[in-house]
Image: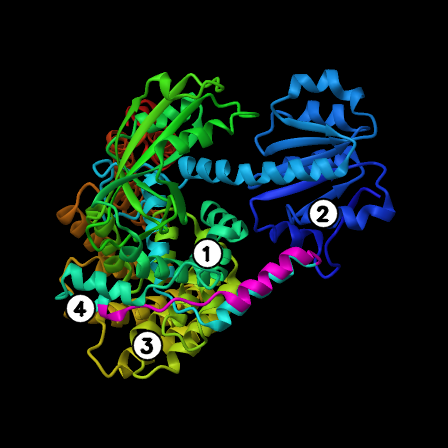
Amino acid sequence: MAEITTTSDVFTDEDMKERNIDDFTLVWLDGNIDEKSKDDTCKQFRSIINYLKIFDNLEECYNYILTVNKEKIFLIVSSKFALTIVQRIHRLEQIEYIYILCLNPSLHEKWTKKYSTIIHGVYNDKELLVGKLTEDVQNSETFFNALILLCTPMTMVSPSSVIVTPSNEQSKHVDFSWFTWYQILIDVMLNMDYTLKEKQNMLNECKQYFNGNVKELQRIDEFDKNCKPSTTNTLLEDDNTIDNQSRCDAYLLEATEIDRNSMIWWYRNYSFFARVIIKAFRTQNIDTLFKFGYIIKNLHNQLKQLHFHSLIQPNNFFVYLGVWMNQKELETIQANVGAFTSILSFLLLNCDKTAELDLIQSQEIGNTRKKIILFEFNLDSGIITKYPFVKIENCVLLTVGTVFRLISIEKLQTTFASKASSVKEIWLAKLMVFNEENTLQINTINYIKERFDQDTNLILLGVFIEHFMGDTIKATEYFRALHNHLPSNHEDRGEIYTFMAHFYFKQNNDDRAFKLYEKAVEFFLEQRPLNNIKLIKLNNDMGVLSMRKKNYDQALICHNNALTLCFDSCSTIDYSLLALTWANIGSTYAIKGENHKALNIYEKLLQYELKTFPSKNEAILVTYQNLGSIHGVLGHADEAINYFHMLRNIVLETDPTQCLTLSEVCHDIAAIYIKERNYQMALTELETELEYKLQACVLANPYSRPNQAGRIESKMSLRSKHLEAMLGYISIKKIGMSLREVQRI
């Protein structure tokens, strides 16, 4: 027996790994567990940290620890394995503290001194160990949340460091992408509708997670019974004519006491909710965020309602948070003065500067960081802010996503350190709440809305994840979670099917993509009035996907459906979509080898395009290319060369820097001349192709990264050698040129 699980048989080990929604994991390594008392011991341990993994094999325990990268591990180990496992894991970041449970603590007194920062005691009394574990978990919650605040959510974004340009390239500014993603996500969650059904789904998730944990299940039932949802004040949302005093009075009328009926009380007193939400934001676990969205939205609304009722401070006042840091983390803060920062989840801050310093210094034991950063947040209660906060006793609770600007960071005198502390440096970082609109972020969002024709942030967020963050898998997860959350008749469900199909198409999961395209078509067909534009695009996408699957008959059905919709549209025909549909039909016939049908379609398409589009439109150039290729396959040399010449002339006139396009045209013409045994003309075209290839390499160098330019040049070099060999063969065998003349070329 290697591993013992304490959860219900309903869930596999993999299920439980995915379901560890908390920030802490408790690992118990013991080769000789007393089976009679095991159940009671497990209940005690799980009352502190619910997620418990038990091992009786050292290697399997060690391998499991190595796989944990999103949680902090508290390890309880027996005397038999203590020294070996400590030596192997004491430097791992995921290890929070280690506790040794044995019969004779004196055996471990000497060697454990070397690891005193990570080993929090040697015990022969289980009750004492449980007490120490409880204390450490409570202290770790404060420190770990602060560490998350520093490393992830307070992502520094300089407003002048990013320029948003309409480009197909993914944004290289990861910090800005994360910052904007987070702000859009919060907007999405705070504008969703959460009913009692969503609350019940969340509670069911909690009950499954706490299966067998009587203490936590009782808390969940108590929350269900006592906690009441907030009510929003639509008057305050919509009426801009009301002055600030009237707004304050309105908040006073709706304010309720912060008691066990309040979401604020539960978030503050039941740390499980806070840990789950913080971890979900930190790990970008969208599914968990949606499941706990009921708490997030109601907590934000209650803060909004109580914002003015609870604050009796001057307009500008200060709250504090102390964080232990190392030198590298300090330098990151120093390098980002003037940048925006965003708070992850909801955050409780101390109104007393001295008390916060004393608190953070009291957590010094076991802490390898020897610098303290005291964050001083300058709040403003004199305005209606989109970032509400509430004063609770001597603390302030900030809402999710509050944005600050980092004003300065300076070193304080060591007199601020307590006498018992060995800390040598205390730094003060000053931040000001940022109530203005972030122009850069707004421009980015507006660009995406225009580029992808989206008005709702529900869809916009998924597009942003895929386009700007370059994470197709995460975008798919987002739309899947959105699909599971929204009602079946929600107006955005068709768009969700469409984008999920696009993402699976990119992942080469063709069968799943096609089914989702079908679901999208089915959804839009039920809408009134019919959205023909969406249906045309979807049928064309299904046709392209069918072509990739080599199901050409199915592709023709889809493209012809799109063609019918183009002409059946009650509104003005979208000429670009009509041209695209005809082009797709022609390409399908060409791939099937039905070249005469393809030629007929392309000729009709060209006549239509010449009447509809400017003569140098890109679509017309593509049609010239297709007509040249089809005529070439059919042996119509003169017609093929004529279309290729028209294509080349337009490119030379409109954009002569398109050297790669021009080289391909030369190559196609040369192939026709070779087929016709006109080797002199073939030689001329091949020489021209070679020149264009080399020009493309030269043009690429100034605008490409060095390694990218090198790859292009290497590729062009191989292509050039191939062309030179062809030139040599044609010249010597058919034209009579000398080898020296060929080499000069």
**How far apart are the alpha carbons under marks 3 and 2?**
68 Å
What residue is drawn where x is 46% and y is 56%?
A: 265
Camera-nearest label, 3 or 4: 4
Q: Mark 3 sits on what residue?
A: 563
Q: Are marks 1 and 4 in contact (CB under 8 Å)?
A: no
Q: Is residue 136 left or right of residue 546?
A: right
**How far apart are the alpha carbons under marks 2 and 1?**
25 Å
x and y percentages locating residue 525 in the rendered image: 38, 81
**How far apart are the alpha carbons under marks 2 and 4?**
54 Å
Q: Label 3 crowding class (10 Å Cα cut-off): few <14, some 14-19, many 20+?
A: many
Name the image quarter holding the C terminus.
top left
Q: Mark 1 sits on what residue?
A: 265
Q: Which quadrant holds residue 130?
A: top right
Q: As shown in the figure, which amino acid type bears the numbered disc 1?
A: Trp
Q: Is residue 13 left or right of residue 592?
A: right
Helix, strand, or loop for circle 2? helix
Q: Is residue 155 magenta?
A: no
x and y percentages locating residue 721 in the rendered image: 38, 30
Q: As shown in the figure, which amino acid type bears the numbered disc 2?
A: Gln
Q: Is residue 213 magenta?
A: yes
Helix, strand, or loop for circle 4? loop
Q: Mark 2 sits on what residue?
A: 44
Q: Are marks 2 and 1 in contact (CB under 8 Å)?
A: no
Q: As shown in the figure, which amino acid type bears the numbered disc 3?
A: Leu
Prevailing secondary structure of the magenta residues: helix
| Magenta segment boundaries in residue numbering | 212-235
Looking at marks 2 and 1 on the same chain, the residue that comes earlier in the sequence is marked by 2
